[in-house]
Structures are given as structure tokens and as C-alpha cells.
Amino acid sequence: MVDPMREHNPGSPSVSRRRAACLMGLAMVLPLLAETAEVRPAQAAAGFPQGPVTLLVPFPPGGGVDIIARAVAERMGPILGTTIVVDNKPGGSTSVAAAQVARSAPDGQTLLIGTPASSINPVFQPHLPPGDTRTVLAPVGRVATLPYVLVAGPALPVEDVGELVAWAKRHPAALNLANSGAVTAPRLAGDLLAHQAGISLTHVPYKGGAAAALDITGGRVHASFAQTLEALPMLRSGARALAVSGLHRSPVLPDVPALAEVLPGFDVTSWNGLFAPAGTPAPVIARLNAALNEAIADPALRARFAAEGVEFVGGAPEALGAHLDAEIGKWTRLRDGANLQLD
């Protein structure tokens, strides 16, 4: 008869033998588990892409973001061995498109072309979907950067920023500025201008820059902060460039002053970044990043857009993450320092 005390005694020979057997079994199984963990991401990358990839653009067709997205998608698709389908999903100051990507399967098949709103929304409307960009989306890589141009149409009788400020002070709240959404960089640029210049203005929201351009050149809206891609055609249609929004002048508009020359420290620029849903396997992110960098290195692409003030950036996913962090920090300081509340 087996002595139960001996059977459960940790120091008994039988228990020691069982413990040794268990440890030996674990020693055999753990390498297999580790190998499986390594194979799964590799399999995810090897199986990507599964058919066409969808790139969501948070603005209507024809605007600056859409133009850049389509040009990059056209070159990235063949590199990945598939087609990248551009799907325009405007609305909610880009949150409609961002939320759809955040809800998508984390497999790299659905992507977002991010904009400054990707850093503005978490600061000014953190309670709305999709939430903090840093937690719901995964950075793939930086795409491009370009300044905004403060463009005035025929309805605004001014030739420079000084005259605009003087006119706005003579006509309180009469100045109206078009923007591409209530919580976007062009809107914020207008608020920063009003704050630093001590004037008041009225915002006129549009779903995209193309529609706003028509109303500005048609004299129905006074002005807007437009990306150079959208501003240059407006200038050819008779609008006037009062200033560019960055710290320095733009090479494509060398005679147009930077707003920082008139309002020290003024710096609001447009940028684009490629994002995937959070949780997308690292090998898939790496493959998308490599394809993006190869696509935007195309000399023909760079030459085409350089004439329109677009600088392609590229780099690792971590560079986009760091840029997003810096932008969120900037908007947070602006919100708190100027007591800005966007509706």
C-alpha cells in the first residue's frame, strides 16, 4: 500500500522523478512555442497582401491630400504586387475615415492617409471616435509635408497681412475664412492668426479644399489657409497670396512672406502620414514602410510635386510616431496657452 504522506512529499523519489520529467517536457515544448511565435508574423508578412489594399482619404476627391494619396498609391501598388484602391471618406474633420481604419482588421489591407487632424483630434475632441491616434492606429511612415498659403479672394480688399489685420479691426467679426473642417489645421491656423493679431473672424467649414477654392475665387468667401497644391491654381485664377504659414518662405512662392515674419512664432504646416490599424503585425508594417519609401523616392514623383511645394519625407515608422507626438504636444500647448476651444 502506498503511503499518502510519502506520495505527496516534495522530497520523495517519485515526486522528484515527476518534476524532472515535467521540466524535460517543458524544455522540449518551449522552443516549439517560440518557433511558432516567430513563424506567425513571418506567415503574416508572406501572405500579405491578400488582394487589393484600400487607402482611405478623409477628404473628397480633387483636394491636396487626395492628389498626394493617389500619386503615392499608384506607385506603391506595383511594389507590393497588388492594387491600392483609394476610397474617399470625408466627414467629421477626418474622424470618419480614421475610425473606419481603426475598426478594420489589423492585417495591412486597410490604410489611412493621415493629416494634421490626426494630431489635432486627440487634443480637441478626445471623447469622439476613433480616440487617440497613438493607440488606435499604427504608424507606417511619413509621406509628405507642405505649407499652407493664406489666400485672399476678390471679396477681401487687402494686399498683405498688415492690411488684412487692419481691415478686420475696422470690421469686427466680418472676416470669414474657409476651412476643411471644424477641427483641422486650416481652422486652427485661422484661430492662431486671430489670437496673435488680436482680431475676430468667422469660420466657414467645407468638406474639402476644392469646394472652398471655388467660393474664394468666386468672391463668396474672403480667404483661407490652403495647401500649396490647392493655393497655386487659386492664384492663377486671380486670388492673392498674403503669406505662407510656416516659419520660412516657400521655394515655390519666394516673394510671399512667412506669417512668422509678421507674427513671430507662427508655424502651422500640412503633413501626411500613412497609418494602419493598431495591432498590425510588425513584418506587415515593415513591408508597407519599405514600399512607401521606395514609392516616394521616385524622381519623377518628386519632380512633379516639388513645383507645387510638396516635400516627400519618408523614413521609419518610428519617425512618424515621433512626429505625431511632437504635433500633439504643439497643439496641446496652443490649446492651453490661447484657451482655444474648437466646435
Image: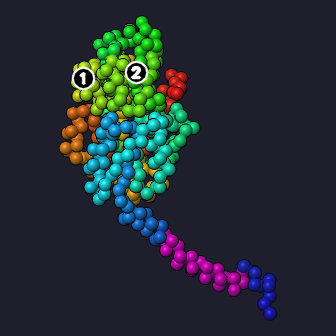
- Give coordinates of residue 100: x percent, y percent: 47, 47
Q: Which of 182 and 228 lies nearest the eye of the viewer?
A: 182
Magenta-highlighted stretch: main secondary structure?
helix
Instruction: Name the residue that disc number 1 marks.
Output: 237
- Marker disc for residue 263: none
Question: Crowding at label 1, few (<14), some or many (≥20) Cα neighbours within 10 Å?
Answer: some
**Residue 189, image quadrant:** top left
Q: Residue at x 43, y 57 (%)?
A: 107
Q: Residue at x 30, y 30 (%)?
A: 230
Residue 256 is inside the magenta segment: no
Work out whether residue 291 can be spotted: no
Furthest-top residue in this view: 170
- Give coordinates of residue 153: x percent, y percent: 31, 18
Question: Crowding at label 2, few (<14), some or many (≥20) Cα neighbours within 10 Å?
Answer: many
Question: In the rendered image, which quarter contains the N terminus?
Answer: bottom right
Q: Residue at x 37, y 61 (%)?
A: 50
Segment tinted magenta in the rendering: 11-34
- Give coordinates of residue 19: x percent, y percent: 64, 80
Mark 1 residue element: loop
Q: Which of 114 and 331 lies nearest the eye of the viewer?
A: 114
Q: Residue at x 38, y 8 (%)?
A: 166
Q: Which of 61 and 77 lies nearest the eye of the viewer?
A: 61
**Cα separation between marks 2 and 1:** 18 Å
Q: Which amino acid, by three-letter code, is at mark 2?
A: Leu
Instruction: Name the residue that disc number 2 marks.
Output: 177
